[in-house]
Image (spheres, helix red, strand yellow):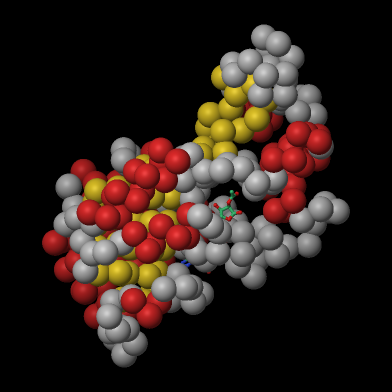
Amino acid sequence: MTIMSANMSFDEKIEKLLKYILEGDVVFFGGAGVSTASGMKDFRSEDGLYKEKNKYKDSPETILSKNFFFQHPTEFYQFYREKMNCLPFEPNVIHKVLAELEKRDLLKAVITQNIDNLHQRAGSVNVIELHGTSMKNYCTQCGEPHSIDDVFYGKNKFPKCEKCGGLVRPGITLYDERLDMEKFEQARQALNKAKTCIVAGTSLQVFPAASLISDFYGQNLVILNKEKVANEEWADIICRENMKDVFDALAKKLNINV
Ligand code: OAD
């Protein structure tokens, strides 16, 4: 395939994307950029979480690793509560349009690296959360589920199990941990069957999630991202515009009330 969108205007790209969407069998593969329009920070943009100066002496990747979590739970939760609390944020037009496309049976799955639950809150059902979810928290000793409010707003320096006093962890994949292979396989199969894959708001720098794109054998690869990413040479549409503008335009064309 070749890049066909290089000389296309924004409106022409929207028309082409709309055509692909209306053909159905679409899978959406997203990352942190999907939630920036909700006010959340992504990781690797200029003003992303990993670039900003902060008071922590370790890098965010180190803090969000399994070893660090068990060795320094106080520092882990200080960072997690300050930087990764998604509870105050609301789904945006991107989440809402995708939920409606699923209802219309045009979108088959949302594969996301996000842990913020915003797709589900917008109404999406088939959401494959490659990196887990911040909504499900549990004791590392006895497995007892734990309240999310205590995880983000608890009085203790880190949440402890009410049953056994063990350290509570978020149900997210930390660095140095394996992805949930069942979800990975579900994502692989969804991509395998799709006619169109929309890759959006992800730098495609974190593996193995990013490697999933090579399981897409369909006809139309669409990339919606402000910055250049890998695999662009295979894309039929590349859109560097703000994704919010792309989905505002789609909502209008598809008569979706957001
Ligand atoms: P990144 O922060 O690496 O990439 C987000 C991408 O979205 C960047 O390339 C931005 O340019 C783009 N972007 C942001 N807002 C946008 C907008 N409104 N319109 C268009 N593009 C926009 O985030 P991910 O690729 O999701 O893992 O990061 C992958 C993983 O790294 C995360 O799941 C997280 C992190 O470490 C874990 O915590 C395990």
Quick check: 27 above or below 147? below
Which residue is at a point 21% across and 74% down the rendered structure image? 16
What residue is at 60 percent from the left and 67 percent from the top?
45
Residue 258's spot in the image, x, y percent?
A: 32, 51
Instruction: Give whichever of 232, 152 is nearer the camera.
Output: 232
Q: Quadrant of the N terminus?
A: bottom left
The residue nearer to you, when weighing 171 against 80, is: 171
User: Is residue 18 in view from this perspective?
Assistant: no
Residue depicted at 75% across the width and 40% down the height: 67
Farthest residue toward the left? 23
Left or right: 109 with respect to 161?
left
> Where residue 188 sits: x, y (%)?
34, 51
Q: Is residue 149 above or below residue 218?
A: above
Q: Is residue 187 left or right of residue 161?
A: left
Locate residue 206, reporting x and y percent: 55, 59
The picture places residue 234, in percent across and down from the top left corner, at 34, 76
Q: Quadrant of residue 162?
A: top right
Spot the residue most to the top. Answer: 163
Vertical placement of 24 versus 134: above or below? below
Q: How many marks?
A: 0
In the displayed structure image, the side of residue 180 where residue 1 appears, left or right? left
Residue 173 lies left or right of residue 244; in this view the side is: right
Query: Which of the pair 155/26 is nearer the observer?
Result: 26
Look at the image and tell me whether residue 240 can be seen.
yes
Q: Residue at x 76, y 24 (%)?
A: 155
